[in-house]
Image (spheres, helix red, strand yellow):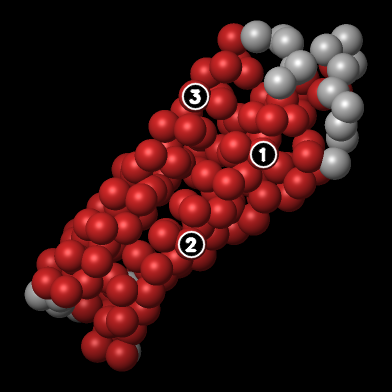
């Protein structure tokens, strides 16, 4: 979609709207995470608890996928287009922080997609919360160095 645009404003201005939608998805995931975190104690026999976990997993996987297969790629393309070697180097370091959080989130999804045992959910949610905080901080920095840093050049 964005590759077909002619001007820098058309091309990289479009990235801004993609990022906005992605950050809105992040907000939805956080709302779901907080709602689930407030439930405890978790009851395997309560179908609402299982459904909330599944909803969180779905939103989380959509968010992670969009980051890896859409957002990060667009940010890297933008950094390359503006020949921002420093920003690309920083983004590479940030990606090294983000990548392990992906594994934590995937493991959570795999575990709760396959079982109905919610006995360790509180501990697992704590681990996920820490991973999300680390991930969000790194993603925000990546957006700052590869997108926000070029916004004056796009205008």
Q: Secondary structure at mark 3?
A: helix
Q: Which mark is residue 107?
A: 3
Residue 63 in the image: state x and y as whole percent: 50, 44
Q: Residue at x 73, y 49 (%)?
A: 31
Marked residue nearer the N-terminal end (1 or 2):
1
Label 1 sits on residue = 126
Residue 92 is left or right of residue 152, and the answer is left
Quick check: 116 above or below 82? above
Q: Which mark is residue 137?
A: 2
Residue 26 in the image: state x and y as whole percent: 58, 53
Residue 92 in the image: state x and y as whole percent: 22, 57
**Contact between labelled residues 2 and 3, with CB atoms less than 8 Å apart:** no
The quadrant the N terminus occupies is bottom left
Quick check: 54 above or below 102? above
| 10 Å crowding of disc 2: few (<14), some (14-19), many (20+) | few
Tally of numbered tags: 3
Marked residue nearer the N-terminal end (3 or 2):
3
Q: Quadrant of residue 149?
A: bottom left
Q: Secondary structure at mark 1?
A: helix
Residue 11 is left or right of residue 56, and the answer is left
**Contact between labelled residues 3 and 1, with CB atoms less than 8 Å apart:** no
Q: Secondary structure at mark 2?
A: helix
Quick check: 49 above or below 125? above
Marks 3/2: CA–CA distance: 21 Å
Residue 17 in the image: state x and y as whole percent: 45, 66
Q: Quadrant of residue 113?
A: top right
């Amino acid at each position: 979609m964005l590759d077909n645009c002619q001007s820098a404003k058309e091309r990289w201005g479009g990235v801004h709207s993609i990022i906005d939608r992605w950050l809105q998805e992040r907000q939805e995931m956080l709302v779901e995470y907080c709602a689930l975190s407030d439930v405890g104690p978790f009851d395997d026999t309560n179908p609402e608890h299982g459904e909330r976990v599944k909803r969180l997993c779905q939103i989380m996987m959509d968010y992670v996928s969009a980051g890896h297969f859409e957002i990060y790629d667009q940010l890297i393309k933008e950094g390359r287009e503006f020949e921002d070697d420093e920003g690309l180097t920083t983004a590479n370091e940030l990606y090294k922080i983000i990548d392990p959080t992906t594994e934590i989130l995937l493991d959570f999804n795999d575990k709760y997609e396959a079982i109905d045992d919610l006995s360790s959910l509180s501990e697992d949610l704590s681990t996920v919360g820490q991973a999300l905080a680390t991930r969000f901080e790194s993603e925000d920095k990546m957006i700052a160095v590869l997108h926000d840093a070029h916004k004056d050049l796009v205008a």
